[in-house]
Amino acid sequence: MALAPNSAAPALATEDSASRRSYLFPFILVTCVFFLWGMAHNLDSILIPHLKKACQLNNRQSTLVDTAVFMAYFLMAIPAGVLLKRFGYKNSIIIGLVAFAAGAFLFIPAASALSYGLFLVALFIIGCGLTVLETAANPYAAVLGAPETSTTRLNLAASFNGLAALVAPVVGTKLILSGKEYSAAQLAAMPEATRLAYFTHEAASVKLPYLTLGGILLLVAVLFYFVSLPEIKAEESEPSEGGGFFAVLKHKHLSWAVVAQFFYVGAQVCVTSFFIRMAKQGGGLDELTAGYYLGLYGLLFMAGRFIGTALLKYVPSQRLLSIYAVAAIVLCGVAVLGNGAYVIYALGGLGFFMSIMFPTIFSLGIAGLGSDTKPASSWLVMSIVGGAIMPYVMGTVIDLQGDNTQAGYVVPLACFVVVLLFGMSGYRVRGRLV
């Protein structure tokens, strides 16, 4: 069933149809922000195998790329909520864009120094910027219109995040991956100068894409600064629900959503972080072909977002979430047990069925929270720390299983079971504060 009015976003302080129409351009700008942070996250899927090779890392060490980004979500969620409350949606988005750009520019000295530690610092700063952006942009997209269509609107904006899942792997494969790989024995046989030159050249390939990304982010920040945007607020008459940061967790459906989002994001990052390794090992592809297949995964992810957004007009969001979770569980099983083309099909299918999970969990989690939406948003963003933890768990499983990437896919499978439980019962609005 459709969400009831006022169930997924605060009541809007709108006065007439003209003010409603004024939300269109702000929504377009916010949608651009969804695309940009999608680029950052999906380039990480290229960075992990690339830096693993350039910096000679094992699977666990390579997942520190995810840890750096998503730990920032955990540490910055409360400060991001404070920024949002004090400075509003527009200024918070500008702050997030500038921090994001600063981290992107730091890739240049990191690559020059061939320093994995400095790469991780840069990624942490990017993660801080992304935290502020998501804390502001997700609820802003949800409230830029009628409350009863907030889930559809949030999925539409997130569809352009899905577009980035197509664009980033193609751009990353073209500009970052070289396709040159050497075994440990071949590297050991190289003269030291040749070996160092190879590693330095591999690391340097990240400079152009991240320099370009940083420049675009600054341009978008300038655009936000000079464009007048509505600062949507809850109606003055709307009472607080008891509103402290920890008090909002007494809304049981929000607590459930935080847990579900933790495991969903963990699952998504696991799937994408090890996609190239999985396509090489289980599907028999070379590095460059696997990178382009990651772009195909992104295409299916994007298609899933648009199709899912359309289906939400006819299927209750929690039911569609449950159906997609069941499909993802089955596909993870195929990825673990299959081989060759079946593994590739399973990975692509996961992209399609994961597509609506984040925005749907987010929207169901803030349903009916009124003026508690902002602290609830911080909790849902903070739960993204699952992307820091679960890939490390998966990398550990892979290393313990003798570098068997397929065995590691039991980790996202277990995560999707939690998402299924949320879609079946955890979403229900109950236990509200009085």
Image: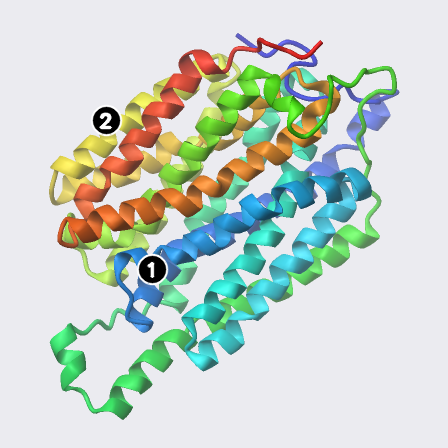
| Residue 330 disc label | 2
Q: Dot 1 surroundings within 10 Å: few (below 14), some, or many (20 or more)?
A: many
Q: Amino acid at mark 2?
A: Val
- What colour-coding does the image apply? rainbow
Residue 372: percent from the left, percent from the top?
71, 24
Q: Position of residue 188 (x, y in %)?
A: 16, 82
Residue 287, above or below 427 = below
Q: Earlier in the sequence, mark 2 or mark 1?
A: 1
408 or 246, nearer to the observer:
246
For marks 2 and 1, give the CA distance: 27 Å
Around disc 2, counting alpha carbons within 10 Å, would you say few (fewer than 14), some (14 to 19), or many (20 or more)? some
Quarter of the picture holding the C terminus = top right
Dot 2: element: helix
Q: Is residue 78 above or below residue 10?
A: below
Image quadrant where residue 19 sits: top right
x 42%, y 52%: residue: 66
- Residue nearest the viewer, comparing 67 with 146: 67
Between circles 2 and 1, the one closer to the viewer is 1
User: Which one is in front, 381 or 74?
Assistant: 74
Residue depicted at x 17% and y 42%? 407
Tell me if residue 165 comes above or below residue 305 in the rendering.
below
**Three-letter amino acid code of the residue under disc 1:** Ser
**Secondary structure state at the residue bearing disc 1:** helix
Residue placed under numbered mark 1 in the picture:
62
In the image: residue 372, left or right of residue 209: right
Q: Is residue 32 visible?
A: no
Pick whichever, 360 or 305, lies toward us: 360
What residue lies at 35% left-to-right and 66% top-to-bottom?
51
Q: Where's residue 173, x and y in %? A: 36, 62
Q: Is residue 228 visible?
A: yes
Q: From the top left corner, tell me how far across and down residue 123 is, in percent.
A: 51, 60
